[in-house]
Each structure stands twice: as structure tokens, then as C-alpha cells.
Image (cartoon, helix red, strand yellow):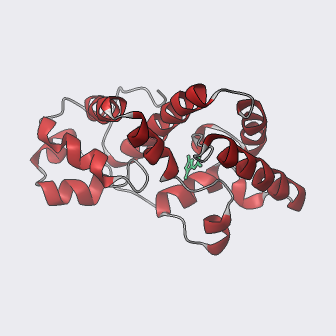
Amino acid sequence: MEVKARHISEVNRMDYEEFIEVFGNVIEHCSLCAAAVWRYRPFRDVKHLHEEIGRFIDDLPEAGREAILRSHPDLAGRLAGLGKLTSESTREQKAAGLDGLTQEERTQMATMNNQYREQFGFPFVICARENKKEAILQGLATRLKNSPQAELAKGIIEVKKICYLRLLDLVEHEGVESRL
Ligand code: 2AL
């Protein structure tokens, strides 16, 4: 999937509807996050746009931040199996090699994803484009040992990384670092 990157000046000229059309899924299934930051135009650059989204998320009550985690599909989960992921998520899961799991890895992932969700009340979230399937399986096993507070914080850090990479796909970013 080739995505067209726009200059920040073009972003700053977008009306609200177009802005949501383009940026509505930079936080998975949470167009409210894009809707909330439109008022902060003009953005200096893609990092500024990312910072405003991050600030909005950080200012949400705990229940809101948990809800953002809950909006993410499981990695290599049911929706992936049904081909019902968003185009962004499909691409990210593929980049991590999650479309090529062995049967054993698939079972391992499903078991730990279920255990994680049962333990914390929200799904395990990690920036798939910054990890390969081995690192994701390892991360799941390690993070299952954390406290709910630590996992809420860690999950939100990962959501912001996912958002950053999605924004880099959409906005020209010469001179801006390619990872958070
Ligand atoms: C995801 C997803 O859909 N894309 C990504 O990088 N991570 N989901 C998840 N549960 O971590």
C-alpha cells in the first residue's frame, strides 16, 4: 500500500473533515484523538502534530487511556485471521512477520494474548513495525510479569510509537528522526 505523504503546509490547510479522513486512524479506531488536536493548527511539523496527540492522550483519565489500548486488535489474532484488520494494522503485522507464524508460534501468541487480556483488562499492545515476531513473543512473556500500572504506561508508549510511524507515512518529514 503506497501512502501519499503531504507537506505540513498542506496539512495545516485541511478543513476538519479532510483532517479526520487523513489522520482519523493514526490512533487505531480512535478518530477522537485527531479530532481533538485539529484546533492546534498550524503545526510546525509532523513532530508537533504527534506531540499534540500525545498530550491529549496523556491528559485523558485512566479509563480513556485503557479504552485506547482496547481499540487495538490482537497481534495475529481473530481479526487478522478473518482479514478484518484496518489497512494500517494489516501492514504493521505483516512487517513484523506475524502473517508467517508457525502453528506453534500462533498458539503461543494466542495463549499469551488471552492471558494478558485476562490479567490486565486490555490487550497487549506493541509497535509491530519496530519488532519482529520473536521480539513480540519475548515481549509478551516479559510484560506479563509487570503491574497493571506499568502495563498501562508501557502500552500507551507503544501506541504513541505506532502513531508516530503512521504519521510519518502521511506527512513529509525530511530531517525528522524515523523513530521516537
Ligand atoms: C498493533 C497493531 O495493530 N499495530 C501495531 O503496531 N500493534 N496491535 C497490538 N495489539 O499491538
Q: Nearer the viewer, residue 60 or 137?
A: 60
Relative horizontal placement of residue 104, taking residue 94 as reference (left or right): right
Identified at 18% across, 46% down, the residue is 11
**On screen, residue 42 above or below 28:** above
Q: Which of 44 and 36 is in front in this view?
A: 36
Query: Percent from the top left, x then y, of residue 42?
Result: 12, 35
**Farthest-out residue, right:** 104
**On screen, residue 147 above or below 17:** above
Query: Percent from the top left, x then y, of residue 25?
Result: 37, 54
**Can see residue 41?**
no
**On screen, residue 153 above or below 15:** above
Relative horizontal placement of residue 138, taking residue 79 as reference (left or right): right
Identified at 44% across, 47% down, the residue is 67
Q: Which of 55 and 22 is in front in this view?
A: 55
**On screen, residue 83 above or below 46:** below
Q: Quadrant of residue 139?
A: top right
Q: Which of 174 and 18 is in front in this view?
A: 18
Identified at 59% across, 45% down, the residue is 121
Q: Quadrant of residue 79?
A: bottom right
